[in-house]
Image (cartoon, grey):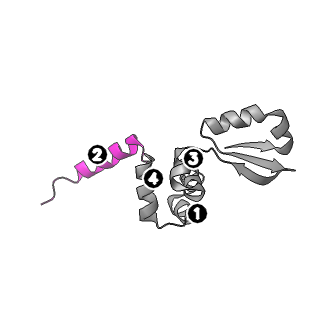
Amino acid sequence: MQTFSVRDLRDRTGELIREAEAGHLSVVAKHGQPVFVAVPLDEPMLQHGVRVALAMKLFQDGVLSLAKAARFAEQDKFRFMQQLADAGVPAVDYPAEALDQELAALDTLGPRG
């Protein structure tokens, strides 16, 4: 997420637009204090509405946890996770190496009977 000053709106409008076209959120600040967020008008925004789409984007960017994003979207976690899945956004970011380590640890326990 990039931050633009109010002055940047005049001098760097093209960059702000390119950021939005690329699907990135941007914060516009005045005297260092956030004033508003520039949110891309994309398919998730049109399909889910501003609140849910913004929550999904903030979750995907790692700004909000799953629980906080669901709360922001005014949904329970299950419903929010379903919307993430429908949008192709993984609800769990589990590195493959960590999964391999966990599976190896389970193998050392031997068969269960």
Which kind of residue does numbered mark 1 sit on? Answer: Phe
Question: Dot 2, how many residues are within 10 Å of its Cα: few (below 14), some (14-19), or many (20+)?
Answer: few
Instruction: Identify the residue shown where x is 50% and y is 59%.
Output: 66
What whole-number distance in Å separates the C-alpha atoms at marks 4 and 2? 29 Å
Which kind of residue does numbered mark 4 sit on? Answer: Leu
Quadrant containing the N terminus is top right
Q: What residue is pinned by disc 1? A: 72
Which kind of residue does numbered mark 2 sit on? Answer: Ala
Which one is earlier in the sequence, the residue at label 1 or at label 4? 1
What whole-number distance in Å separates the C-alpha atoms at marks 1 and 3? 15 Å
Q: What residue is pinned by disc 2? A: 104
**Mark nearer the viewer, 1 or 3:** 1
Do tag 3 and tag 4 residues touch (Cβ < 8 Å)?
Answer: no
Between 96 and 48, the one lying in front of the other is 48
Q: What residue is pinned by disc 4? A: 84
**Mark nearer the viewer, 3 or 4:** 4
Query: Where does residue 99 sit, x and y in percent of width and height?
Result: 35, 46
**Mark nearer the viewer, 2 or 3:** 3
Residue 61 circle label: 3
Query: Per the image, is 108 magenta?
Result: yes
Quadrant containing the C terminus is bottom left
Instruction: Identify the residue shown where x is 33% and y is 43%.
Output: 100
Stretch in magenta: 94-113
Query: Per the image, is 45 magenta?
Result: no
What whole-number distance in Å separates the C-alpha atoms at marks 2 and 3? 30 Å
Which one is earlier in the sequence, the residue at label 1 or at label 3? 3
Label 4 SS: helix
Query: Compared to 12, does 70 lie above or below?
Result: below
